[in-house]
Amino acid sequence: MRATVLVRRNAILLRTVDSYTRLLQLVRQARDLGLVAICYDRWVASESYRAALLQDLGLQQRDNGLGKVQAYGGGSSFQKEAASATELQTDKRWAQMRGEPEYQAVLHLAARDTALMAALDALFPKDAAYLKSVAEQAPLPQGAIS
């Protein structure tokens, strides 16, 4: 299998940021559109949140656990050894990437996207504050480009 080249990999990430921005905008409009938005972070962290959403959707609650990590597709790309969803630590994955230069470059670009920042401010203010702090840092060391 051929490795994905840098430009293509980053194009994929930037398209994903754009898709995420549009999704956040849709989440803000969800109730007006008769949709139920599910916050993954809350879903994973809270049994009561899962129960309330199932009730809102008119679904019977049978098992409110998170279950096992599926083996198909190779399991988790971050934690191959995880057997249970509770072991995945999906809320900490960003920390595994924070030292990667490509990830940092994407964060710097995302932090300057006004539509993304507006949506984050409304829905995830802590994430917005983090990205604002990223935007305040110079993406390249002074003198790197002459």
Image: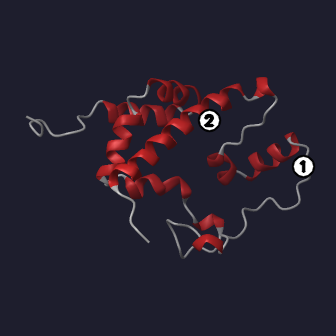
Going from the N terminus, do you reach mark 1 or mark 2 first?
2
Name the residue beneath numbered marker 2.
23
How far across and down, in percent of the image, does residue 124 sit?
Answer: 55, 34
Nearer the observer, 119 or 146: 146
- Residue 22: assigned label: none
Q: Residue furthest front?
A: 2
Q: CA distance from mark 1 to mark 2?
A: 24 Å
Would you call the spot at circle 1 few (<14 residues within 10 Å), some (14-19), or many (20 or more)? few
How far across and down, in percent of the image, does residue 4 sit?
Answer: 39, 60
Q: Amino acid at mark 1?
A: Leu
At mark 1, the secondary structure is loop
Q: Residue at x 25, y 38 (%)?
A: 139
Would you call the spot at circle 2 few (<14 residues within 10 Å), some (14-19), or many (20 or more)? some
Q: Residue at x 29, y 51 (%)?
A: 101
* Above or below: residue 111 compared with residue 46: above
Q: Residue at x 77, y 49 (%)?
A: 50
Nearer the observer, 37 or 20: 20
How far across and down, in percent of the image, does residue 13 sit?
Answer: 45, 46
Query: Is 96 left, or right, of 16 in this rendering?
Result: left
Name the residue beneath numbered marker 1.
59
Q: Quadrant of the N terminus?
A: bottom left
Which of the two discs, 1 and 2, sits closer to the camera? Answer: 2
Q: Residue at x 39, y 51 (%)?
A: 8
How far across and down, in percent of the image, does residue 87 sit?
Answer: 59, 67
Query: Is 72 left, or right, of 14 in this rendering?
Result: right
Q: Amino acid at mark 2?
A: Leu
